[in-house]
Amino acid sequence: MARVCELTGARPVAGNTVSHAVNHHKRRFLPNLQTKRVWDGETNTFVTIKATARAFRTLDKKGLRAMRKAMA
């Protein structure tokens, strides 16, 4: 299963880990994905969403309908 946020589309990004001796080696920064059941007011059902913690905070503020509309 891909590590992609269903609400914002956040994906892993590549970067470097830099040691104290300034040695660089490649690494991946993974998004903070969480799985949560969210109430969908349109269909009156619970929907399981895999999204980042940041997206869930925005979801609490805007609502599921607005988040999906912005994503489409």
Image: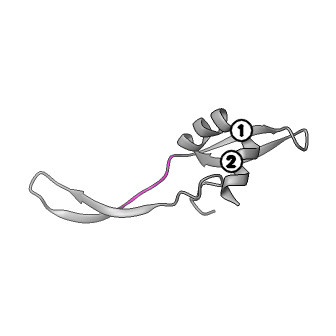
Q: Residue at x 19, y 64 (%)?
A: 24
Q: Quadrant of the C terminus?
A: bottom right
Q: Around disc 1, counting alpha carbons within 10 Å, would you say few (fewer than 14), some (14 to 19), or many (20 or more)? A: some
Pointers 2 and 1 in contact (C-beta within 8 Å):
yes
| Residue 41 badge | none
Secondary structure under tag 1 reads loop
| Relative horizontal placement of residue 33, taking residue 29 as reference (left or right) | right
Residue 3 in the image: x percent, y percent?
56, 59
Q: Please, what is the three-letter code of the amino acid marked with disc 2?
A: Met
What is the residue that sits farthest to the top in this orientation?
Answer: 60
Nearest the eye: 24 or 59: 59
Considering only vertical position in the picture, is 28 above or below 34? below
Q: Which residue is mark 1?
A: 63
Secondary structure under tag 2 reads helix
Q: Residue at x 72, y 52 (%)?
A: 68
Q: Please, what is the three-letter code of the amino acid marked with disc 1?
A: Gly
Q: Which residue is mark 2?
A: 67
Q: Residue 31 magenta-drawn? A: yes
Give the magenta part as a residue range. Answer: 27-32
Q: Residue at x 67, y 53 (%)?
A: 70
Residue 22 in the image: x percent, y percent?
12, 58
Q: Around disc 2, counting alpha carbons within 10 Å, would you say few (fewer than 14), some (14 to 19), or many (20 or more)? A: some
Q: Quadrant of the N terminus?
A: bottom right
